[in-house]
Amino acid sequence: MWGRVVEIMTAVWLASSPWIFRASSDPSLMWGDLGISLLIASLAGLSYWRPTRHAHLLILFVAVGLITWGRLAGTPPPSAHQNHIVVGLFLLMMALIPNDASNPPEAWSKFPKKL
């Protein structure tokens, strides 16, 4: 489940980025980043629960929204919106990683163990 941990860490980065990029004076940008980061962390956290183990795939839609928001901000986009593009692209990669990516394939566990 290391992919979900990385998504939660990325949500923390996104929540702190308005202060890093000095964009905290723009309330819509600040609250947008905080809301989106809460959504990302919630979806990643829900993936730990067995009935909602595929909730992390909804992060793909959030990532596409971040990329679109950053790209439509202007030419060239300000640094805070460039951050949205990079975070969105990174989340696209992370959300595709399955929850059990660290485990060996199930077929391997069926082989008899020889010592």
Image (cartoon, helix red, strand yellow):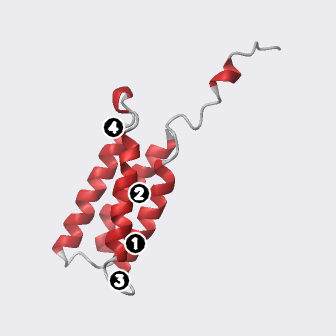
- Seen at 67% across and 19% down, the residue is 109
The span from disc 2 to disc 4 (Cα, nearest Å) is 16 Å
The span from disc 4 to disc 3 (Cα, nearest Å) is 32 Å
Earlier residue among tags 1 and 4: 4
Foreground residue, 60 or 16?
A: 60
Answer with the quarter of the image where residue 102 lies. Answer: top right
Of the residues tagged 2 and 4, which is closer to the observer?
4
Side of 54 where 27 appears, left or right = left
> Which three-letter amino acid code belongs to the residue tagged 2?
Thr
- Seen at 28% across and 51% down, the residue is 39
Percent of width and height locating residue 58: 36, 47
The relative height of residue 15 versus residue 43 in the rendered view (above or below) is: below
Determine crowd level at label 1: few under 14, some 14-19, many 20+ residues with C-alpha closer than 10 A. many
Percent of width and height locating residue 84: 37, 69
Residue 78, label in figure: 3
Residue 46, label in figure: 4
Determine crowd level at label 3: few under 14, some 14-19, many 20+ residues with C-alpha closer than 10 A. some
The span from disc 3 to disc 2 (Cα, nearest Å) is 20 Å
> Which three-letter amino acid code belongs to the residue tagged 1?
Asn
Residue lying furthest right in this view? 115
SS under mark 2: helix
Residue at which label 1 appears: 83
Earlier residue among tags 3 and 1: 3
Percent of width and height locating residue 34: 25, 61
Foreground residue, 29 or 64?
A: 64
Determine crowd level at label 4: few under 14, some 14-19, many 20+ residues with C-alpha closer than 10 A. some
Side of 22 where 28 appears, left or right = left
The span from disc 2 to disc 1 (Cα, nearest Å) is 11 Å
Q: Quadrant of the C terminus?
A: top right
SS under mark 1: helix
- Seen at 35% across and 83% down, the residue is 78
The relative height of residue 102 versus residue 91 in the rendered view (above or below) is: above
